[in-house]
Image: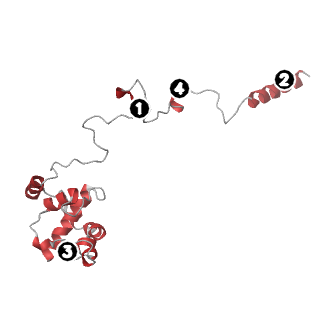
Amino acid sequence: MKRIYKITLLVGITILVSSCHNNSAPNYQYFPNMYESVGYEPYAEAKVFKGGKEGQLPVEGTINRGFEPYEYENSTAGYELAKANLKSPLTEADRNSGKGKELFEIYCISCHGAAGNGKGKLVEREKFLGVPSYKDRVITEGSIFHVETYGLNAMGSHANQLSAHERWLVADYVLKLKSQL
């Protein structure tokens, strides 16, 4: 008889303990503010922050992740310096990869043409006029990279579409086209 009481008591305690457990709401949280952080509105007023607003400007000198600083300024003097001094960091394997040609065909061929003669589809349809041929220009890999980075005249910057490495690949391909003209 005592054995039946012990088994009944054990089953009763098991049922009691398991009935208190709820998977959707855990009982305890260690450091609950790590799980339920305070949500701040970017333009709300707050006395804790400098200037009394939540949204703060980045610290001076901060650069975006992945951003590579370019030391030449967007001016004629910067263009001339880049033309004279800037050299490609590409290896021989990169230069022969064919990626430069692919990128040129995506971003440049519509204006500059497949041969680099300035006779792309947009020029033929008179959407843009005065696109120069590469053979008429004194260009270096540094000047091409500079123009791809900042743009020149009607050509806009391609720095948002192409990484620095990709711009160097295109510059190398442009020089190959120039040598074939």
Q: Earlier in the sequence, mark 1 or mark 3?
A: 1
Disc 1 + disc 3, Cβ < 8 Å: no
Find the distance from the CA under tag 4 to the CA under tag 3: 65 Å
Q: What element carries label 1?
A: loop
Q: Quadrant of residue 165?
A: bottom left
Q: Mark 3 points at which residue?
A: 118
Describe residue 50's horizontal placement relative to residue 15 as left or right.
Answer: left
From the viewer's perspective, is residue 13 above or below residue 138? above
Task: Pick the quarter of the image with the N terminus.
Answer: top right
Amino acid type shown at disc 1? Glu
- Tell me where residue 118 appears, x and y as whole percent: 19, 74
Q: Which residue lies furthest to the top in this view?
A: 2
Q: Relative to 139, say whether 23 is above or below.
A: above
Q: How far is the residue under mark 2 from the one under mark 1?
A: 62 Å
Could you tell me how far apart the alpha carbons at marks 4 and 1 are, in whole angstroms? 24 Å
Instruction: Determine which residue is flagged by label 1.
Output: 54
> By what rule are the colours in the image chosen?
secondary structure
- Which of pointers 2 and 4 indicates the residue nearer the eye? 4
Q: Nearer the viewer, mark 4 or mark 3?
A: 3
Residue at disc 2, secondary structure: helix
Nearest-to-viewer mark from 4 and 1: 1
Q: Earlier in the sequence, mark 4 or mark 1?
A: 4
Q: Which amino acid type corresponds to the residue marked 3 in the rendered image?
A: Gly
What number is the disc on residue 6? Answer: 2
Which badge, 2 or 4, comes first in the chain's sequence?
2
Q: Kindly state the secondary structure of the residue where label 4 is placed.
A: loop
> Residue 103 placed where, x, y %?
28, 66
Q: Which amino acid does label 4 sit on?
A: Phe
Residue identified by numbered label 4 = 31
Q: Residues within 10 Å of mark 4 (few under 14, many from 20)?
A: few
Q: How far apart are marks 2 and 3 (CA)?
A: 96 Å
Who's the residue at 58% across and 27% down the image? 29
